[in-house]
Image (cartoon, rainbow, N blue to C red):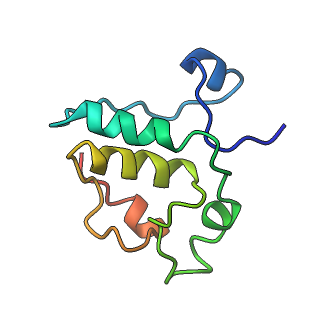
Amino acid sequence: MLHGVRRVPMDIALAGQVTVIAVDYSVPDADAGLDWLRSQVGQPYDWRGAFGLALDVDRDWQEETDWFCFELAACTLERAGRAIFADTGHITGSVLMAIKL
């Protein structure tokens, strides 16, 4: 079954998945980030964003119509007051490797 943005317990969401790295962030306003994130439940998965990083370099990753994992996490952190990408206009493979921890 394909999913977009959904709210489920983490152990269910990650069942059968391989976690490469888990990163904890400190944010100035966690409630603002979580409120915004909850408002995105039901949005579809962004297949174009997930597969088109190298193909669509001018894509605006902050379009709030659908999300892939890095977009959703980055925008949630930004809404909570912690920007992790130097350039939030679009995400490329090289930008993903330049996350500010």
Q: Is residue 29 left or right of residue 34?
A: left
Q: Can residue 14 be seen from the camera position used here? A: no
Image quarter of residue 30 = top left
Q: Is residue 32 left or right of residue 56?
A: left
Q: Is residue 36 above or below residue 67?
A: above
Name the residue located 62 percent from the left edge and 30 percent from the top edge: 18
Name the residue located 42 percent from the left edge and 59 percent from the top edge: 96
Closer to us: 97 or 80:
80
Q: Is residue 58 above or below residue 91?
A: below
Outermost residue, right side: 1
Closer to us: 62 or 51:
62
Name the residue located 51 percent from the left edge and 81 percent from the top edge: 57
Task: Give the position of the N terminus as an image quadrant.
Answer: top right
Closer to us: 55 or 2:
2
User: What x and y, as percent, mark residue 22?
Assistant: 41, 30
User: What x and y, as percent, mark residue 14?
Assistant: 62, 25
Q: Is residue 43 left or right of residue 93?
A: right
Outermost residue, bottom side: 58
Count of number-bearing discs: 0
Q: Can residue 23 be seen from the camera position used here? A: yes
Name the residue located 58 percent from the left edge and 80 percent from the top edge: 56
Task: Give the position of the C terminus as an image quadrant.
Answer: top left
Q: Is residue 12 above or below residue 51?
A: above
User: What x and y, as percent, mark residue 19?
Assistant: 55, 30
User: What x and y, as percent, mark residue 45?
Assistant: 67, 52
Q: Is residue 83 left or right of residue 1?
A: left
